[in-house]
Every structure is written in structure tokens, then in C-alpha cells.
Image: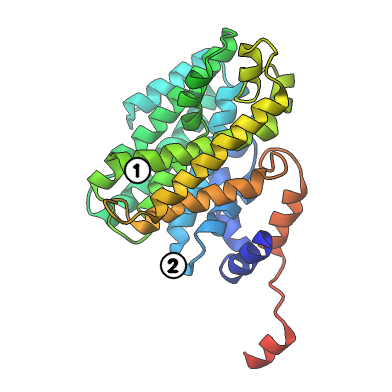
Amino acid sequence: QIMNQLGSIYTKHISGRRLSILNSWVKEKRLDQLEFARQKQIYCYFTAAAMIFSPESFDARMSWAKNTMLTVAIDDFFDNGGSREELVNFISLVEKWDRNHEKQFCSERVHILYSALYSTINEIGAKTSALQKRCVTDHIVETWLTLVKAMMKESEWARTNTVPTMDEYMANGYISFALEPTIFPTLFFVGQEVSVDAIGGPEYHNLNKLVGIIGRLINDMQSFEREGKEGKLNSVTLPIVHSRGSTSKEEAIREIQSIIDSSRAELLRLVLQNEGSVVPRACKDLFWKTSRTLHLFYMKNDGFTSPTEMVSAVNAVIYEPLKVGHKFSEVN
């Protein structure tokens, strides 16, 4: 039912031609030359169009899709694509955010990644700043810096065989799931003024944290077996390790599901709250739609990473024409 609803909305406004724009951007930025990076353009644009489907929201969709592509490539870079020297070099470049960076790359992979990030974020920042009538680029860059530092912490944990506590893992994990650099710039495209108070206050922080927790945990539940074979720990395996096996896999999953359910209920409460709310409702809706899309991708398995039925479903939504009933055709 969800897929049918998304398909009907999507195919009225989005075509393969729009996806080709994203593919051209990937080639222009040379992201397709990174051998370690997953090429997920079709998924990235699908998630954008599933949530932001009005015809006039093209810039919002492209911002979402491009930022998602960048988070996928950079996540793969920190996960297994880059050396420690390259990761440190990349973070240093993001910290400086300097246009005069041509001689500061320790490798061609860093060059490609940082150049793509720098040019894309500055372009999106210029558009959002014009819409909001104030500079918001620095705020967008800050979300990326926070993300890459969180990714670096996970990389260091893996390199040194560190076993974090569950609290340490989650405090870092909801950030490293990499939703904020995608959601945050898109908020400025939803057609409303977003004040400094709105993006700097506890309401925004809680919305961002809750959707990050939901994403991190449902991803962990579907990927823990694969990641376990790769020697990685997550929110399913950590309780088992810390309890020295006295906590079963089933018990760990039940506890995580309980946290997901309570986080989703709290997220919905914040979205629907009117009294005392400073974040525009259209912005809050984006967090809720993100949560719903996450559940679509992870309800059976890791639908974003693994080849599954999601591939044919997404292809059908993007490429197959909308079938209009006979009676509807006669009326129109």
C-alpha cells in the first residue's frame, strides 16, 4: 500500500529525466570514479521524491538527493575506503573550508570527495541563503563537520578494537547515521522562513536526534549479522558482548525495538505539538516523513545496501508509466 501511494504521487511529477540530472552530477563530480563508493543514485532520488513530491520542489529534491549521495560516498570512505592519513586530511579540509585547497590533498580520493562536497554545499548554501535572506552555508558546513568527526570516532573504535558502551555508541551513532546533513539544508527549501532560534533550539535538536536514533537502530537490526561477520559491533551485538553472553540476540532486539517504538511516538508528538513550537510544521513534517521512509527501506532487511525486492520496486516507481484506469481516462 505504501509503495502504491508513493508510486502514484511520484510518477505524476518525476521522470527518468530528473534522475539523469543526478547521474550527470555524479559524473561531473567524479564520484563514480571512487571504487569503494556505492552508486545509489536511484535510491537517493527515490527517497527525495517519496517525501518531497510537489512539482515546484525540484531544488529541495536535488538538495536531498545530492547530500544523500555524498553521505553514502563519505560513509564508505570512512568505513573501508580510506587510510587513516586520508581520513585525517579530509576532516582537516572540512574544518578549514577554504577555497584555496588545491595543494592540500594527500590523495586523489580525498581530492575527489572534498571537491565534490565543497562545491555542492556552497551551491546549495547559496540557494538556501537567497531563500532565507541570510547566510546559512556555515550552518550546513557545521553539520558535515559534526558528521565526519562522528564517522572518525567509529573508524578509530574499529582500528583500535575498542568496545564502546551502549551510551557511547548511541551518542555517536545517531549522528554517524548521517541524516542531518541531508535533512538540514532541505528544511530551507520547504517554503517557509526558518529562524535561527528554530534551528538552534532544543526542539530542532530533539527532532534531529530522534530520527537519527530511529534510523541507527532499525539499520542495526537489519545489518548486525552482516556487520558481525565483518567484525563490527552495533546496538544489537554490544549488549551481548557487555553481558558476556547472558543477554540473548532476541532480548537485545526486543529492547531495541522498544526504543524505536518510543522514539517514534515521541517524534510524532513533537511533530504534532503546536504550543511552544518554533520549528515550522512543514519542517517538522520532513522529520516524520524521513522516519516513514526509513521504515520502508528497513522493514524486512537492509533495503538500502543489499540487493532486495526494493530494487524492482524503486525501478518500477521511477521508470514504469502510471497506469490510469479506463473510467478516469474517459473523464480526462
The type of residue carrying mark 1 is: Tyr
Of the two numbered discs 1 and 2 in the rendering, the one whose residue sits closer to the viewer: 1
Q: Is residue 127 left or right of residue 213?
A: left
- Residue drawn at x 59%, y 23% is 79
Q: Position of residue 304 (x, y in %)?
A: 66, 42
Q: Is residue 98 left or right of residue 173?
A: left
- Residue drawn at x 59%, y 71% is 12
Of the image marks 1 and 2, the number of the one nearer the N terminus: 2
What quarter of the picture does the C terminus occupy?
Answer: bottom right
Of residues 288 and 121, the one drawn nearer to the viewer in this rendering: 288
Q: Which residue is mark 1?
A: 204
Of residues 246 and 291, the one drawn nearer to the viewer in this rendering: 246
Q: Residue furthest top?
A: 160
Task: Label 2, secondary structure: give it.
Answer: helix
Q: Is residue 106 visible?
A: no
Q: Which residue is mark 2?
A: 56
Q: Position of residue 6 (x, y in %)?
A: 62, 62
Is disc 1 in contact with disc 2, using a CB cutoff of under 8 Å? no
- Up/down of 4 relative to 93, above or below: below
Quarter of the image where one finds residue 155? top right
Q: Position of residue 147 (x, y in %)?
A: 44, 30
- Residue drawn at x 72%, y 40% is 301
- Up/down of 82 relative to 300, above or below: above
Between marks 1 and 2, how big is the CA–CA gap?
25 Å
What quarter of the picture does the N terminus occupy?
Answer: bottom right
Quarter of the image where one finds residue 197? top left
Of residues 293 and 47, the one drawn nearer to the viewer in this rendering: 293
The type of residue carrying mark 2 is: Glu
Q: Is residue 200 left or right of residue 263?
A: left
